[in-house]
Amino acid sequence: MKHLTITRIAALALLLAAPLGTRAQQSEYADLAVDALWSSANEAYAEKRFAEAAELYTRIAEMGYSSAELYYNTGNACFKAGQNDIALNGRPFASGQLGRAVLNYRRALRLDPSMSDAQYNLDLAVDHTNDTDGVPEFVMARVWRSLRNMLSSNAWAALSIVLLAAVLTLTILYLLSRNVALRKAGFFGALLLAVMFVLATVMAASQRSVERRDDMAVVVCRDTAPVHSSPDNETKVIREPGQGVTVTLSRTLGEWSEIIFADGEKGWIRSAQIEKI
């Protein structure tokens, strides 16, 4: 591949020669290859060769590596490459990069819900989709999502344990202290921290349910994808979502998948037209 330095090409060659070595050597060669691809992808992005950068980042993911930063960079590269389509194809995102951008931003947020840059860029990307029939997010729902995404489920769980320990400590202070001021501080402090403990526990459970969801998918196509009333091309087309629209995957039947839109409408789409987050 062009733009790879001799060192990076050598690293890739070592990976191809690895099967005869030990598992540790293979892992080391794989890491060298990933480092080479990562450097090349960053270099391509810096030089505004966004389509090439997106391809290189994607190849790293296909090798089994994943991280919020990797998916975030891939999303950025795809979005930039799609914007460049206006010069190449007369309109932005003609090559289908918008769907890939939304998909990778959502994957980044799945691994790191607190990545505010990924959330901001995702919102920008979604604004370019044709998901006009989606259910609008109310202010309180947006506030709840923002608050929940401040920490991962494990971090919320750890915080709830700390708060519970503090509640028990202040409760003991209230029960055992003979000083009126300390008893008041213990009582009201325990009450406040108990509320915070419940909130943190709810946040942990809510975030964990989001992180464990594996039924979300993104429409990936060059323009729009027909959604039929039944898994048959001859049936009525009930909707034509564009690239980047996020749906819930209900079930699959052969090469068809039943999906549910944000407003609850169901339909059947070719499985090749969607990709799970």
Image (cartoon, rainbow, N blue to C red):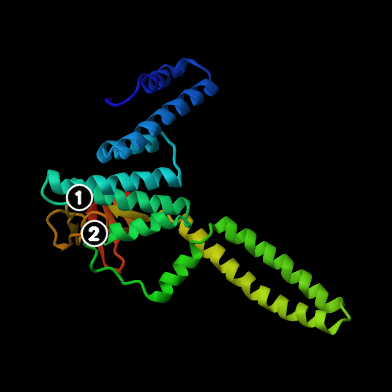
Pinpoint residue 154: horizontal percent, then vertical percent: 58, 56
Corner quadrant of residue 13 = top left
Give neighbour class at mark 2: few <14, some 14-19, many 20+ (Cα, 10 Å). some
Q: Residue at x 31, y 66 (%)?
A: 262
> Is residue 136 visible to the viewer in this orientation of the structure?
yes
In the figure, 105 relative to 142: above or below?
above
**Under tag 1, what secondary structure?**
loop
Q: Position of residue 65 (x, y in %)?
A: 44, 37
The N terminus - image quarter: top left
Amino acid found under the numbered disc labelled 2: His
Identify the residue at horizontal 70%, vertical 67% (top origin). Answer: 164
Above or below: residue 67 compared with residue 160: above
Residue 236 falls in which quadrant of the image?
Answer: bottom left
Q: Earlier in the sequence, mark 2 or mark 1?
A: 1
Q: Could you classify mark 1 by the number of other residues whose Cα lies within 10 Å: few (under 14), some (14-19), or many (20 or more)?
A: many
Q: Residue placed at 26% from the left, 62% from the top?
A: 127
* Residue drawn at x 15%, y 49% as measured from the top left: 86
Q: Provide the residue designation for mark 2.
A: 128
Q: Are marks 2 and 1 in contact (CB under 8 Å)?
A: yes
Disc 1 designates what residue?
A: 93
Q: CA distance from mark 2 to mark 1?
A: 9 Å
